[in-house]
Image (cartoon, rainbow, N blue to C red):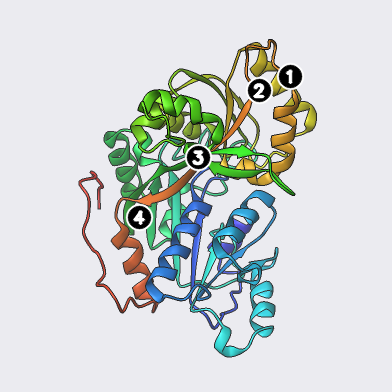
Amino acid sequence: MWCLRLRNGLFRRSPIRVPCVCVGNAASGGTGKTPAVIYLVGLVHALTGDARSVWVVARGYAHDERVLLREVLRDAHLLVLGKNRRTAVQRALERVAPHEHPQLLIMDDGLQHFGMSRDMNICMIDAMRPRGLNGWLLPAGSLREPIGRAAARSELIVLHNANLVSSRRIAAISRYLRRRGVCARITTSRVEVDSLMEATPGQPHAVLRPLKEVPSLGAEVKRITRDPSATSVTSPEDATRVCHRMRVALLCAIGNADAFTMLVRRCVRFCDVTFVQQFPDHHAFSARELESLATRCADNRCDAVLTTEKDWSRDAQGLFETLTRVQPKSNAQPRLRVWVLKTRFAPDEPGAFRELLVQIGIRDSLAPVDTRTTDNPIVR
C-alpha cells in the first residue's frame, strides 16, 4: 500500500531545520545499515571536531542496536528514538537550546520512512544476497520493496560485504542496477575484524577484555615467546599461535549469519569452527537455549563460544553466566570461554562518504576531501 502512495505522491514530508542523511536498504536485516551509521557518526566527529554535532534518529525497536549506537554516541540524548521519527526529532530539538542543535541528523533504517524529509539517501545492499533471501517481497521473502526502486531514490549505493564475494559478482550487481535506470554512484564496503575480546567476570556485569591481556593465557604466552616475564601476546602472530587448534562454536542472531561465519573462517583462521548455532535476527537468547548450547559445546569438546558484539550487547551478563555455568565433561577439559568478535565498517572509497557530507554542508577545515578510488571493478 505504501508503494502505491509513494508512486502517486500521497506522502507528505515535513521539513526539519537540520540537514539529514538517511541510511537504509530494500531488504530487511543484514545489510550493514547500523555499522554504516556508526562509521558516519565517527566521520562527522572527525570532520567537525565536535562529538555533539550529530544525532542519530532510529525507530528503536531493536535493543541490541540501541546499545551499540549509545556506546558510539557516548551521550543518551544524542540518540532520538520513536516510531514517528519526525515528531521525535521535533520534540528533541524543542528540548535543547538552538546553539545545541546538531549539524547533521542520520536516520538509521529510514529508506521506507517517508514522513520525514532528508537531504541524501544511502542505500545499503548486501553483496552476498543483493535480492534478499529469495527475491520476493515481504512476507514471502525479505524485500521491503524492489531493489531497483530503492536504489533509484538514493544518492549513494553501497554494496556491503564486498570482501566476502568475488569481483565478478560485484560487477554483476552494478550492471543489474544500471539496467534498471539507477544513476547514483555505486561503491563498495567491507566488514573488517577490529578485535577479539574475551568475557571475564566483573562487577556488576561481565566485562570484555582484549584476548591478549587475559591472565589465563600467561603460561601459553611464556611458552611461545620463551620469555619468563611475558604475560600478554604482543603481536598477531603470537595470538595466532596461542589460539592455534582451539575448537570454537559460533553463536549469532543477526541478519546475515553466513557473513559472520565466512568472516570468522577467513580472518580468525587460528580457530577450528566446530559448529554454528544461529537464530533469527534480534532473537533474545533464553536460558534453556544457552544451556543447550553449552552442553553441546561440552559434548564437542569446544574451548570457546564466539559471538558477535551485537549479540553480546543484547544480554551480556546472562550470556556469560549461562554459558560458563555448565561443567565440562571431564576434569581435563577447561571451562568454556566466551569470546566476542568486534568488527568495523570499512568503505573502499572513503571519499564517497566525505563528498556526500560536504554536499550538505559538513565542512572539513583540517584536510581536503579524499576522492581517491580503489581498484574495485565498480561499474559507474
Tell me the distance, in whole angstroms, between the alpha carbons under discs 1 and 4: 56 Å
- Horizontal side, residue 322 vs residue 132: left or right: right
Circle 1 sits on which residue?
Answer: 327
Circle 2 sits on which residue?
Answer: 335
Residue name at image x 69 percent, y 23 percent: 293
First-in-chain label (3 vs 2): 3
Q: Amino acid at mark 4?
A: Val
> Is there CB contact under 8 Å for labels 3 and 1?
no
Q: Nearer the viewer, mark 3 or mark 1?
A: 3
Q: Amino acid at mark 1?
A: Gln
> Is there CB contact under 8 Å for labels 3 and 2?
no
Find the residue positioned furthest to the bottom: 98
Q: Secondary structure at mark 4?
A: loop
Q: Nearer the viewer, mark 3 or mark 4?
A: 3
Is residue 306 visible in the rendered structure shown here? Answer: yes
Q: Secondary structure at mark 3?
A: helix
Circle 3 sits on which residue?
Answer: 213
First-in-chain label (2 vs 4): 4
Coordinates of residue 116 in the picture (x, y in percent): 59, 71
Q: Amino acid at mark 3?
A: Glu
Coordinates of residue 109 in the picture (x, y in percent): 56, 57
Q: Nearer the viewer, mark 1 or mark 4?
A: 1
Labelled disc at residue 182: 4
First-in-chain label (3 vs 1): 3
Q: Nearer the viewer, mark 3 or mark 2?
A: 3
Q: Secondary structure at mark 1?
A: loop
Q: Residues within 10 Å of mark 2 (few under 14, many from 20)?
A: some
Coordinates of residue 92 in the picture (x, y in percent): 67, 77
Tell me the distance, in whole angstroms, between the alpha carbons under discs 2 and 4: 54 Å
Q: Residues within 10 Å of mark 4 (few under 14, many from 20)?
A: many
- Horizontal side, residue 73 vs residue 287: left or right: left
Coordinates of residue 22 in the picture (x, y in percent): 50, 64
